[in-house]
Image (tube, grey):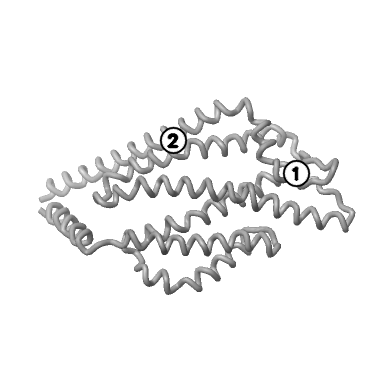
Amino acid sequence: MTQNNSTEDSGLQESFLSHLFELRDRIIKSAIAIIVVFLCLVYWAPDIFHLFAQPLLQALPAGGKMIVTDVTGSFFVPMKVTMLVAFLIALPVVMYQLWAFIAPGLYQHERKLIVPLVVSSYSLFIFGMAFAYFLVFPTVFQFMASYNAPLGAEMSTDIDNYLSFAMTTFLAFGITFEVPVVVVVLVRMGMVPLAKLREIRPYVIVGAFVISAIVTPPDVLSQLLLAVPMSLLYELGLLIARFYVPKPSEEDADNDTKSGSDSQATS
């Protein structure tokens, strides 16, 4: 009896270690993909930063310019922006490595759902960042610059502060555009019924305005530019989730698979 228990413990330990080794390999491959893309782009780092800062530069008054308050800021800030671009370009590789790691533990119908989810998640995240870059940034910067003229203040933004603001905004809008994916996953996995998600719609709208008030600059226009798309994307998620409601046959198949695996483990 003791020998059997020790054999099972050693088997579980070997299985756990094999998963850790596989996870390490997946992380290394993802890191290599990001580094390779970064090395290909690093020569154009100043041009990439200039494109990155274009919404702010267009909002500055005549003669306005960005400043550097840190000695190493003029070098590291463009490198950080280039690394961000490299991560976005290599993100499909990172998502594929993640999918390859978790795929063996998924049911067959869940595996079929992974590829559309990965593609839609990546596309929606990019759309969210593009929405912030082409619409939110020009609107917010023009709005803020209009307050400097009556005060007689000169608008000169530090490039490191601009990077922090832009990264926070990109992340907020990128995650916001993932709302339809989250809704579909919750419904498809049977975590939350579709009727319940429709029922809590008013609370979601209130939560969208609360979140926008926290992560956006303190003006009504910026908050609306985040809260309204978040609410509309939630409605879009509800519409799409109707086609992904789990069927009783799939749930029965999952239960049979679980019971079969449990009986094998017991035996």
- Frontmost of labels 2 and 1 is 1
Q: Which residue is drawn at 86% across and 54% down?
A: 149
Q: Position of residue 176 (x, y in %)?
A: 53, 56
Q: Where is residue 63 in the image (x, y as percent from the top left)?
A: 85, 41
Q: Residue at x 70, y 62 (%)?
A: 218
Q: Which of 202 and 267 is in front in this view?
A: 202
Name the residue that disc number 2 marks. Answer: 30
Name the residue that disc number 1 marks. Answer: 58
Q: Which of 55 and 151 is in front in this view?
A: 55
Q: Position of residue 261 (x, y in %)?
A: 16, 53
Q: Residue at x 41, y 69 (%)?
A: 197
Name which quarter of the figure residue 41 lies in: top right
Q: Position of residue 166 (x, y in %)?
A: 64, 47
Q: Nearer the viewer, residue 38 or 113?
A: 113
Name which quarter of the figure residue 186 lies in: bottom left
Res. 256 mark: none
Q: Which amino acid does label 2 sit on?
A: Ser
Q: What residue type is labelled 1?
A: Gln
